[in-house]
Amino acid sequence: MIKIRDMHADDVSEVMKIERASFNEPWAEVHFYFELYTRTAINWVAEEGKDICGYLCFWKISDELHINNIAVKEDRRQEGIAQKMIDKLLIFGRKNKSNMMILEVNEHNEKARKFYEKNGFVEVGRRAKYYAHDQADALILTKELETK
């Protein structure tokens, strides 16, 4: 059974394995430590038993949630783990009276784009040549939340 809990400093080495396998421009380890000690940052891991199989890093700033990083271990993809993390984030957002979620995604990342579209995110803008490795644009996606 998947449990989503707060990320701790001793989780970072396992998170880094997922990060490096998931992204062409992975965060450095120091980024995760920085996020753990940033007041606006909230970081979760998805685990089954003692196996960390995914993570989600986001900021809560005023009434907005900004997703900075989400990934699932390669051999655990398509099991609904990312969906569980997003579902928990939606609940968190509603409980904390957040009005919007926002993120950037590589324009070429079709799987991620479809995942976010399925979850009600819409494109509201672009950041030109945001990704250095392929000069791809970042699509800015948002999702409005009901706070009732």
Image (cartoon, rainbow, N blue to C red):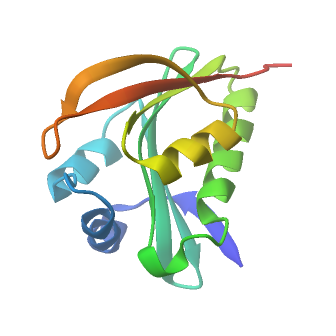
Residue 24 placement, left or right of 10: left
Nearer the observer, 9 or 138: 138
Q: Can residue 65 be seen?
A: no
Residue 49 percent coordinates (x, y): 59, 85
Nearer the observer, 56 or 95: 56
Question: Which residue lies at the image location 33% right of the left edge and 74% below the top edge?
Answer: 14
Question: Which residue lies at the image location 18% right of the left edge and 58% below the top edge?
Answer: 29
Question: Which residue lies at the image location 44% right of the left edge and 73% below the top edge?
Answer: 73
Residue 41 percent coordinates (x, y): 41, 36
Check the picture and name the quadrant holding the N terminus.
bottom right
Residue 28 percent coordinates (x, y): 16, 54
Relative vertical location of residue 34 with respect to residue 82 in this rendering, above or below? above
Question: Which residue lies at the image location 24% right of the left edge and 21% below the top edge?
Answer: 128
Q: How many marks?
A: 0
Residue 144 percent coordinates (x, y): 68, 19
Nearer the observer, 29 or 132: 132
Residue 96 placement, left or right of 76: right
Check the picture and name the quadrant holding the C terminus.
top right
